Image (cartoon, rainbow, N blue to C red):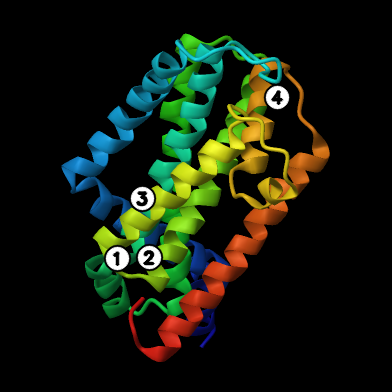
Amino acid sequence: MSGGATASGGDTAGSPPADRTRRDRLAAGVLAHVREFLREPVHVVLLLALPPLVVEGYGRAMASFPEFPYMTAVPTTLGRINGAVFAAAFLAGLIGLFQVVSAVQADGRLAVCGFSRAELFGARLGTVAAVSVGSAVVTFATLWWRVDVAAPAAAFGALVLAALTYGLIGVLIGTVLPRELEGALVLVFVADFDDFLASGVVDVDSPIVTLLPLHYPHALFRSAVLEGAVATDEALAGLAYLGVLFALVLGAYVRVANGGEGA
């Protein structure tokens, strides 16, 4: 009897806690989506080639741009800084879009394994976050090679914020418009318009600019790269913007999932 009780107690003591099991399942889900992402060569090419091309392309394009008094740096440097933010954000947005539209097979395999909707949703967002950080690493390395960065840690954090913001925007577009071509066109239009107005290349005096997704990441990144300073209020505003986007993505996901239209 005592041996049976001891064995039972050993099984109970050896069983993983519920929160650890959830973490393991979430990690497995993220790994499944990352593998799905890496199976497509075009995704790997985009991750490694797009940031250097955009950063250097923006810098060379701005080289012939006149230097206006409101600019905080010479046009070439400003172009590379803006190119870094756009590259990290746009790439993360594409991944967020593809995670919703193209990850059906990975979701299907995870659902067969008993994953809940919440776990599938967490796995998608975890994958977007992981790829966003990866795109920020490649983009930041490219910029650092060409531009002296005053505060590297703060600049990298601002770049990750830009990537996460557009990663969620990509997920939102993919949830509302689950088609790769149409969703990519919408994402390109939104990202180009947003980056142009929030970049500081043009002097836009309007409170509407503060509502743009890249307004705070751009301001934080420029300040960290050029001045080595970070404004706490802008950082908090950028994180609050990210929180609002997360709430919108969660609401859209729940609505589509309950309607049986996907996800």
Q: Closer to the camera, 74 or 48?
A: 74
Judged from the image, the secondary structure of the residue bearing numbered disc 1 is: helix
Q: Residue at x 58, y 69 (%)?
A: 248
| Label 4 CA crowd tier, 10 Å (few <14, some 14–19, many 20+) | many
CA gap, disc 2 and disc 3: 9 Å
Q: Secondary structure at mark 2?
A: helix
Residue 22 seen by the camera: yes
Horizontal placement of 68 versus 112: left or right? right
Q: Is residue 259 above or below residue 207?
A: below
Q: Quadrant of residue 97?
A: bottom left
Query: Mark 1–mark 2 contact, CB under 8 Å?
Result: yes
Query: Along the line of sight, which residue is nearer the eye, 140 or 75?
Result: 75
Sooner in the amino-acid sequence: mark 4 or mark 1: 1
Residue occupied by mark 4: 223
Q: Quadrant of residue 66?
A: top right
For the residues labelled 2 and 4, the Cα–Cα distance comes to 32 Å
The residue singled out by tag 2 in the image is: 174
Point out residue 168 in the picture as x, y percentages from the top left corner: 50, 57
CA distance separating discs 4 and 1 = 36 Å
- Three-letter code for the amino acid on which mark 2 is drawn: Gly
Task: Judge the density around disc 3: few (<14), some (14-19), many (≥20) Cα neighbours within 10 Å.
Answer: many
Three-letter residue code for mark 1: Val
Residue 120 lies left or right of residue 6; in this view the side is: left
Give the mark nearest the N terminus, 2 or 3.
3
Disc nearer the start of the sequence (1/3): 3
Marks 4 & 3, CB-CB < 8 Å contact: no
Residue indicated by mark 3: 94
Q: CA distance from mark 1 to mark 2?
A: 6 Å
2 or 4: tag closer to the N-terminus? 2
What residue is disc 1 on? 101
Amino acid type at image mark 4 = Ser
The residue depicted at 37 percent of the width and 27 percent of the height is 54
